[in-house]
Image (cartoon, rainbow, N blue to C red):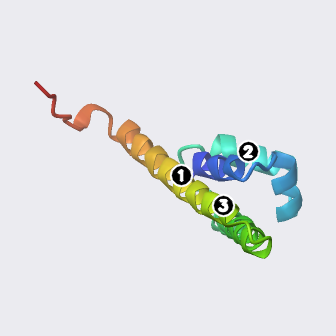
Amino acid sequence: MTGAEFKAIRESMGYTQERIAQCMGCTVNNIYKTEKQYRGREVSGLMAAAMRLLKENYELRNEVMGYRTGDKAFARKSGKLNRLQELRQMKALAEEQIRLEGDSIAVPRGK
């Protein structure tokens, strides 16, 4: 997970850097540095694992809330939002790969 992915996950959950720092037991400065300095590099395994756990917890909480309230529309919306987040992450990864490879990728042009 890169710093950019770390930031994208945080933003998709609607959390501030302060909230993530509080959840992870670190300083806001640590989160800021992780998002900025590791933008194109891998984040440390511990920070990446903690973020994945927070994301899973967030998604599970949304699903449970939807089922607990009997709000089927909420549950469906939560599932769609999760899929949208996955697609956005895939897009970001693809864009990053293209940026890293530069012009070495030949894109076919239509007529």
Q: Earlier in the sequence, mark 2 or mark 1?
A: 2
Tell me: residue 55, above or below residue 20. Answer: below
Residue 53: horizontal and vertical position, in percent?
70, 70
SS at badge 2: helix
Q: Is residue 1 visible?
A: no
Tell me: residue 1, above or below residue 49. Answer: above
- Identify which residue is drawn at 79% across, 75% down: 68
SS at badge 1: helix
Residue 60: horizontal and vertical position, in percent?
70, 72
Q: Local crowd at mark 1 within 10 Å, few (<14), some, or many (≥20)?
A: few
Which quadrant of the figure contains the N terminus? bottom right
Q: Local crowd at mark 3 within 10 Å, few (<14), some, or many (≥20)?
A: few
State if disc 1 and disc 2 touch (CB < 8 Å). no
Q: CA distance from mark 2 to mark 1?
A: 27 Å
Foreground: 89 or 75? 75
Label disc, if present, on residue 84 of the rendered structure: 1
Which quadrant of the figure contains the C terminus? top left
**Three-letter amino acid code at the position of disc 1:** Leu
Q: Quadrant of residue 73?
A: bottom right
Question: Does residue 16 appear to the left or right of 105 in the view shown?
Answer: right
- Identify which residue is drawn at 74% across, 74% down: 64
SS at badge 3: helix
Q: Earlier in the sequence, mark 3 or mark 2?
A: 2
Question: Does residue 69 appear to the left or right of 3 in the view shown?
Answer: right
Q: Local crowd at mark 2 within 10 Å, few (<14), some, or many (≥20)?
A: few
**Three-letter amino acid code at the position of disc 2:** Lys
Residue linked to disc 2 = 33
Question: Does residue 65 appear to the left or right of 96 in the view shown?
Answer: right
Question: Does residue 84 appear to the left or right of 74 in the view shown?
Answer: left
